[in-house]
Image (cartoon, helix red, strand yellow):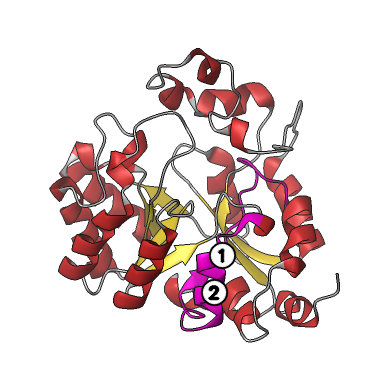
Amino acid sequence: MTNAAFEAARADGVIDTFLSMPAPRIEKAKVYDYIRDQAMDSETQDMEMPAEYMFKEVPHYEELTDPVAEVLTLMDQYGIRMMIPGIAENEHAQRACRDYPDRFRGMVNVNPNTGMASVRELEQSVANGAIAAHVWGTGLVTRVPINDKKLYPIYAKCVELDVPIITYAGVPGPRIPMAAQDVALLDEVCWYFPELKIVVRHGGEPWTKLMVKLLLKWPNLYYSTSAFAPKHYPADIIDFANTRGADKIIYAGYFSAGLGLDRIFSELPNVPFRDHVWPKFLHENAARVFNIDAAPE
């Protein structure tokens, strides 16, 4: 399908707000050991990626000489100007951000269970170039719900540093409890921190109608499309983007955790966004929320 509005927006350079650096199978599997340790079912123990039962054609690498070079090649192929990887304990992501700051800007993972240490780490990481904080409270031991008061010092520091925080809402893919990322928990945080920019990952399902209500209610709340192949974007989110929410929806792929860029970009032109939504979705909203200069090189 030819989609002129999509192609025009892509020509200005896509900003992808989700990047998991690719790695050979064995290394990639080890990254998720912390989830396997929490899962109680036997099938999870044998999965390379603990939610791969939900995805077709998860990217796999038997060998990989240079992950940064691999990602740069794919970015050039698909018109991606910039990607945002997690930099905690990932030397390739750190190298990418250091050597190619016009193509990669990092986010720092924070663990509120460590108290002030997490606040200091966030501050230092932003001073060194990170543009966002990231927390997946559902995957932590102990779990930390979205509105847990252990997160409040981190939220306050994000406001002070003028960086967004990326969090998760909806039923998680891995087979661990979901209560920590109930969509309704966002309401309290948005109320108490009206200056905090919150970017929600991984769909908010099955509460997408509530997600839309909260996106409409709170100016500081944003939605990214991570972990969804484009043909499965929730209809509630598409309708919201096409009506009152064009400024609130941010593109996020899921490479290389669960989706390949070839599948994503073959399906994207078929998403029924209105023409005016595409540039906002593919780069303008991310540039504004993450304080990125989105002008093409």
Residue 253 is left or right of residue 286, and the answer is: right
Q: Which residue is mark 1?
A: 235
Towards the viewer: 283 or 246: 246
Q: Callout 2, which amino acid?
A: Asp
Which residue is at a point 32% across and 46% down the rendered structure image? 181
Q: How many residues crowd mark 2 within 10 Å: few (<14), some (14–19), many (20+)?
A: some
- Residue 237 magenta: yes
Q: How many residues crowd mark 1 within 10 Å: few (<14), some (14–19), many (20+)?
A: some
Q: Quadrant of the C terminus?
A: bottom right
Which residue is at a point 72% across and 55% down the rendered structure image? 264
The magenta-colored residue range is 232-261
Towards the viewer: 266 or 160: 266
Q: Secondary structure at mark 2?
A: helix
Q: Quadrant of the N terminus?
A: bottom right
Q: Quadrant of residue 76?
A: bottom right
Which residue is at a point 45% across and 70% down the rendered structure image? 290
Residues under numbered marks 2 and 1 in contact, where contact means CB atoms less than 8 Å apart = yes
Q: Quadrant of residue 225?
A: bottom right
Q: Quadrant of residue 117?
A: top left
- The disc at residue 6 is none
- Residue 146 magenta: no
Image spot of residue 106 (x, y percent): 49, 55
Q: CA distance from mark 2 to mark 1?
A: 6 Å
Image spot of residue 204 (x, y percent): 43, 54
Image spot of residue 105 (x, y percent): 52, 60
Image spot of residue 256 (x, y percent): 65, 43
Q: Secondary structure at mark 1?
A: helix
Q: Callout 1, which amino acid?
A: Ala
Give the prevailing secondary structure in the magenta stretch: loop
Q: Which residue is mark 2?
A: 239
The answer to whether residue 117 shows anywhere in this view is yes
